[in-house]
Image (cartoon, coloured by chain):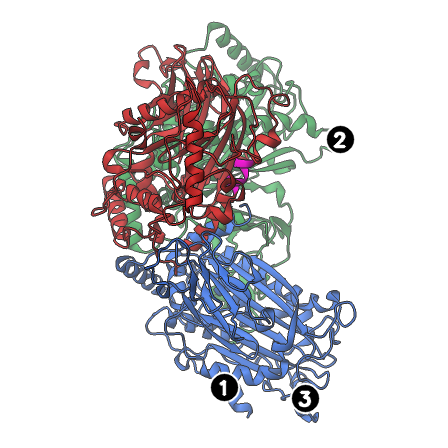
Chain colours: A blue, B red, C green
Amino acid sequence: MRNARGFARNSARSKRGKSAASLDSLKDRVAALAAEYRPGWSLPGAFYSDEAVYRAELERIWRAGWLFAGHSCEIPKAGDYFTLEVGADSIAVVRAADGMIRAFHNVCRHRGSLVCTEAAGHAKKLVCPYHQWTYGLDGKLLACRGMGDDFDKSQFSLKQVAVEEFEGLIYLSLAKKPWDAERARKVISTLARPQGFAKAKVAKTVNYLVNANWKLIWENNRECYHCNVNHPQYTKANFDHFNADDTTPRIKAQIDAAVRRTEELPSQVDPAATRKDGGMTSFPDVDNNIWFSANRTPLADGYVSESMDGKNVAPLMGDYGEFRCDTLRIRTLPNFWNHSSCDHAVSTRLLPVGPQLTSVRVWWLVDANAVEGKDYDMAELVPFWQLTSEQDWEICERQQRGVNSSAYSPGPYSKYKEYNVDAFVRWYMKLLGVKGVEQPRAKDEFELSK
Amino acid sequence: MRNARGFARNSARSKRGKSAASLDSLKDRVAALAAEYRPGWSLPGAFYSDEAVYRAELERIWRAGWLFAGHSCEIPKAGDYFTLEVGADSIAVVRAADGMIRAFHNVCRHRGSLVCTEAAGHAKKLVCPYHQWTYGLDGKLLACRGMGDDFDKSQFSLKQVAVEEFEGLIYLSLAKKPWDAERARKVISTLARPQGFAKAKVAKTVNYLVNANWKLIWENNRECYHCNVNHPQYTKANFDHFNADDTTPRIKAQIDAAVRRTEELPSQVDPAATRKDGGMTSFPDVDNNIWFSANRTPLADGYVSESMDGKNVAPLMGDYGEFRCDTLRIRTLPNFWNHSSCDHAVSTRLLPVGPQLTSVRVWWLVDANAVEGKDYDMAELVPFWQLTSEQDWEICERQQRGVNSSAYSPGPYSKYKEYNVDAFVRWYMKLLGVKGVEQPRAKDEFELSK
Amino acid sequence: MRNARGFARNSARSKRGKSAASLDSLKDRVAALAAEYRPGWSLPGAFYSDEAVYRAELERIWRAGWLFAGHSCEIPKAGDYFTLEVGADSIAVVRAADGMIRAFHNVCRHRGSLVCTEAAGHAKKLVCPYHQWTYGLDGKLLACRGMGDDFDKSQFSLKQVAVEEFEGLIYLSLAKKPWDAERARKVISTLARPQGFAKAKVAKTVNYLVNANWKLIWENNRECYHCNVNHPQYTKANFDHFNADDTTPRIKAQIDAAVRRTEELPSQVDPAATRKDGGMTSFPDVDNNIWFSANRTPLADGYVSESMDGKNVAPLMGDYGEFRCDTLRIRTLPNFWNHSSCDHAVSTRLLPVGPQLTSVRVWWLVDANAVEGKDYDMAELVPFWQLTSEQDWEICERQQRGVNSSAYSPGPYSKYKEYNVDAFVRWYMKLLGVKGVEQPRAKDEFELSK
């Protein structure tokens, strides 16, 4: 009874508003607040705390787009399931009897109880704990004692949630008409295939409740302007923090050498680096339906893995043949990013809890056959991304407190270093229905790299 | 300073709205939400979380009806008092000098401080701790140093709260014109008299804060459709979980035998069973002012008490002459139910704290002369209803999370098993002023049993 | 990450509302609630819990007036700083290179992160931890790597906050046109000068989060009607709890003797008592811009200091030449009071966190050269005001719960004992823009004493 309390109350603060009148006033309020927005500058403060804005985001983004849910290797057998919460919506993701992954609103069609009550588990059928209405792994209502013989069970399946699987990454959409996912599937699948997510195992997860609006976490993620001082581990391994304004000839030579290292090695399976510059590839682009980005990016000299000392911390994953220094990077808006080295992969999932509260889960994956204590050691595997993540959450919580001030006013983005923060904010504003915002065209590195 | 915090903030979230304009908009909002309601189906989700709905309930139900407050045996002597909180309203229930029980708003007429600051206590006079304004046990202002000689004390009595006592059960009403209580008094008093609540003592109380709307707790209470799997202890002792659709001839014979057992015994004081079927008596009925229900119900073979093994766990209470297997059951809306065996009684009181938070208190009573350790043992007395209660709170908290989902939609009630949930929901909607809801007529078992 | 949570969420609940429409509706709501107010009576309940009222107060009072921030002795060297939070607004108070005290909104002009992240510290420059935008101690933006050569840094100074220092007491104002402070400076500085705040040191601070509206804390502070029973320590040392209605000839003689004691002593520096009666000097007076009050007040016979036994608990402060029994008292609305004995000083600062939550800090100061363990002992220095303060917070939290009741209605103030509570409430209502409230003229004791 105790555990669920804070959570439940929080998530409930921001629901309802279905009637036409309340949606109109929502729209009016968002439009009024958006009038203070100036492209190229950070968002007006209300966008990080206002309940109406939050409700609009749930509607236009979180219940419209594709959300990373988890890894297919977490539910290998028919009947395996896990649950997640998007705002106040609980979703069950299930491996069905036919081996396909399906997702349902985890809400009994009888009186609305949660059906799956554990964060993860295994079940032959999905049985509501309240009155034992029993659903198949395909969501169909199979039994409901006491409802009488004339009751039409076919009308009371669990409500379906759309699912896509990209090479072991499970996505779901709460929308009736989700965003188009074909291009995302092609780009992500092609780049992710050799990583072997589907034959990986989860070595570790850490859950965070971050006192910051989810957009602050993305804005932090979309630039490495803050990395030099805040991420001592990350910047040793990477080139992202070098941009057009501070990539010296020496650094450029290092990047080129790093790119060449991976291009020159003979390999059947390892694709070479697609990212050949410092900084970050341009993304997202709402006009071209680009809510995803993936690339292979070289690491600094001496790093074959994003680890504290650059050495590998686990055996090779997937189809990789050698300990090479490229990393796979995937991001999908609004809630996922992944950094994968040849030996391990780290996934980060955001879920909104309230205007100023975001639930974050971080997964560390290794090859399914790797044995803890023998093939890998938590003390080596975990610190690089645990430190980097927690450094960022602290930044975001400080920023949340600052943008809550009545004295906060939007500030200008650096064109060298924050082009992707700007792109994210424009993408967001356009999805919210704000007029007159131009979206720069994202480069298609995947296409270019072919 | 620390303890009161969460509570105070919570209760304060849902107050005010006195001006005519805000009451109108309240009415409009409730009416808009009620448009989604379909009789025979569970309530639309907003009814379990919306602040406006909660304010309307406080006004139309909690500050209109009769609320169980506590037991008269808790305040045996003049000057004994206890306090309780109905939403943000603190009430003091006091045994006055004339032996009568009175209740007052526990709010000083000077600057509004709480007057009685303990959950229960004893006082010759009620003295506000702030400036020592002093009230008699009848609520009259007796002294207020510093206000000057021309100050008319008669205008500053504590605000009275209406009180009724039904054979040791204390009820109060915050209404100017409370619901009619005459029929309730007659039915409850007649059936409760032999139980001897007034000469009982409280052996144990447990307080819960349940993260669920108070209506979910009632809806859970009004059916035993959920009992088979959720209440292994309860279903061994009772027949309620058998309804018209699953009462086999064998079960019907068991019920008949149980009813006969109590009818056939010669007894001056023990009334025989009034409930002669499985399932639950139909209740409530707003059109006939039936917000209460009471009956004597047989227990299963081998059970003389609602205890873990069916044996008595304390000496006989009240006027009972023998360890018989009937139980007294009383329910009064919106906040009380009681199950009393021949040897002990268990009372449950609900009080709303917020749209998604309900304070619940459970009392275990035994005969006033019973001695702990000698005549009864907590480990035998408490588990049956502690387990059953906590099983229900967990159910309700899971349901709250489900109905908070944007995907929740009302589901159909079983006509065999949930007729009383439906009756409760219709009662509620009619009290809220929703038009076009029909209320089935409640059976008057008390009348029928005569 | 954990610590800031409750705080951040709380403060965020009450922000925004900048658009003209929302300010209008704010004004309408406050006006509607004010219609229930009756001068001479306590405030209607909504004034202690309503979000709209709270937002109006932030606008009309907290972001308009002069707020006590801290003591200049806390930041003796250039680069020393401390931070404080007024509602959701974080402010940094800094000793600049020129030795002057300056204050800034602690919000980076880039993306709004908090700049100073500690409660207090030392820095040569103010460097935002996010992207290292670097500000001088005068708030000017000195460096912002990555913004390009054409970036006009002069437009991005930290937003200035007005500062006044009165003999070691630091005040700030978030207003563009703060209230006039000239008379306050003259009165407070003249009376405070011999106390030597500027050459004191902080011996102890205690922070409280009080579950009460800030006005309840002031209303408590503005009368000693509650002292007799609630403050056993305080009433032994003082005469404030005697008013026109209960100052007997014996008490009047004691007061006169106490006043004479300080007048008769030959002294260069110690000003004699300005307060020559029991009770409290009349204050505030919005029509005459009197938001401050200061006097020198005699202590009871046997008390040279507000300590448990009346004996001094530390060496003499400031310019005092003898252990005399006068005390300095300063109050400034909306957030400060100070009681200073010859040997130690106690400052209390209020900051609003939400409608029902106030952050309170209490400082104990002694002479800068006093050495703990040798010249003073915490166990002697702290209890008098720690006990008195905590007695008051408990009173205020009980009153908050009472005024939250739907049954609370305003009560009458005693003309003998609560004239200053009434004056405070009238001052407040006039600042909120409520029409038709008359403000009694405050006596100018300082003027009278000359």
The residue lying toward the viewer, choosing from C339 and B311, is B311
Q: Which residues are magenta?
A: B384-390
Question: In what element is the residue under mark 3?
Answer: helix
Residue B388 painted magenta? yes
Q: Which mark is residue A262?
A: 3
The residue lying toward the viewer, choosing from A321 and C151, is A321
In which quarter of the view is residue B377 placed? top right
Q: Is residue C245 above or below residue C430?
A: above
Q: Is residue C36 above or below residue B225?
A: above
The disc numbered 3 marks a residue on which chain?
A: A
- Residue, far top: C249
Alpha carbon distance from label 1 to label 2: 71 Å
Asked whether the residues under marks 1 and 2 belong to the same chain, the reply is: no
The disc numbered 2 marks a residue on which chain?
A: C
Left or right side of A14 for A381:
right
- Residue pointed to by mark 1: A444
Q: Is residue C218 visible?
A: no
State whether the magenta stretch is mostly helix, strand or loop.
helix
